[in-house]
Amino acid sequence: ICDFLCIKNTRGLRSQLKDSVPVTGLGTQIGAYGVQDTLRSGFSSVKNELLPSHALELSEKNFQLNQDKMNFSTLRNIQGLHAPLKLQMEYRAARQIQRLPFLQSSHLALDTLKGNDESISFEDILNDPAQSEMMGEPHIMVEYKLGLM
Amino acid sequence: MALPNVLETPPSGFNFENVFRNVALEGLLEGGRTKAPKPMKTGTTIAGVVCKDGVVLGADTRATSSEVVADKMCAKIHYIAPNIYCCGAGTAADTEKTTDLLSSNLTIFSMDSGRNPRVVMAANILQDMLFRYRGQIGAHLILGGVDCTGSHLYTVGPYGDIDKVTYLAMGSGDLAALGILEDRFKPNMELEEAKELVRDAIHSGIMSDLGSGNNIDICPTRSQSLKTRGKYTSIILVQHLF
């Protein structure tokens, strides 16, 4: 675990990112029959869907995923397959320690595992979910999380 | 688009919801009378010099918002750690926030490990942070400090490029300041001589550049081997007489 935490921000090799997360983050909510669900997500516009609105939007959406992929891949190359497997198992376990979706969870275990408790970045200052202006309706949020929506 | 129902909590960090709206608004405004508000830039001269037992950083104090002087006594020398200070040029808010984040990260580190932060750590943290945002954060920084390995002066550009040098100037008045530095810099100068050199460099930046002016701030960061009373760094304000 110590080794992994030391390479938190590696400037990894390009080759490690061959199979990184594809750019589909901008897709709309797919409802029934594979078509945009107008009732729940509003009207769709081709321009909004195809082009990222800001140069950084896609890169920020995928940033944590890409970092993790690079780190796990490097770790696998150095220490073997067991290292990322064990770490990912721990992450999965820690990720489940949270409240229902409409309540604030501290993610303490997950943060400690990832090393986020020792650094401050824009994620901690801007857009704090505890002070979000919008409140989700509890039933709908739980249904969405469970995949019933 | 704003939805009546939120399906999951929005992720923390930067929010890009309003970008389309801003682009549309700008298109509307350019044809009309009003203009979109411009961010406050520092339009600066900042300079740094490595001297015998430390580093001397200097900056002017004018902040401009396109053609208007927005702040006459703006503090451009930011505190990072007791032994590290940073001058910032570029967008004022960006330099302020970035140096704040850097300072907090280094404080957490030194509380965690019980060690004084090193200048190279500050430079690496800045590099990672600025490269991640691909230059959208307009912060041109001069990072200088003294640690257990000696005195160091780094420049960090907005895209995350780093240069480690012995004397340096940045900002809109950097060419004028660099002229003075190139002429009179000698390695291993005494502290007073270095302070005068930085003061003259900033002075020439103020004289030749419209974006710099008002006063000069000088901040010497000395190594701990010198016996000084009280705090061993202080920001000295030099009034500029027109």
Image: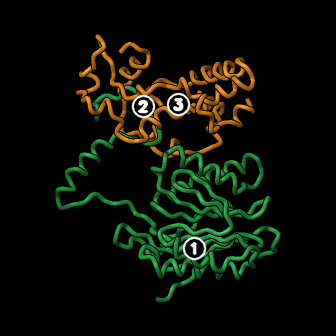
Quarter assignment of residue B154: bottom right
* Residue A52 place in picture, x, y as percent: 36, 36
Q: In this view, does B28 lie above or below B175?
A: above
- On what subunit does the disc labeled 3 rest? A
Residue sitting nearer the eye, A108 or B143: B143
Q: Report the side of B209 relative to A44 (left or right).
A: right
Q: Can you give x and y, in whole percent of width and height, for residue B204 in the image?
A: 53, 81
The amino acid beneath tag 3 is: Ser
As drawn, B168 above or below B1 = below
Number of marks in the image? 3
Q: Which of labels 3 and 1 is toward the front?
A: 1
Determine the colour of chain A. orange
Q: Residue pushed farthest left? A: B32
User: From the viewer's perspective, is A38 left or right of B74?
Assistant: left
Nearer the observer: mark 2 or 1; the answer is 1
- The numbered mark, 2 or 1, whose residue comes first in the sequence reads 2
SS at mark 3? loop
Task: Return the residue at label 3.
Answer: A105
Mark-to-mark CA distance, 2 and 1:
50 Å
The three-letter amino acid code for the residue at tag 2 is: Thr
Asked which colour scheme the image uses, the reply is by chain
Which chain is represented by green in the image? B
Q: Position of residue B146 (x, y in %)?
A: 73, 64
Q: Which residue is drawn at 52% across and 60% down?
A: B140
Quarter location, residue A66: top right
Mark 1 packing: few (<14 Cα in 10 Å), some, or many (20+)?
many
Q: Mark 1 points at which residue?
A: B178
Would you say B151 lies left or right of B11 here? right
- Kindly identify which residue carries mark 2: B9
Chain at numbered mark 1: B
Q: What is the crowding at mark 3: few (fewer than 14 residues within 10 Å), some, or many (at least 20)?
A: few
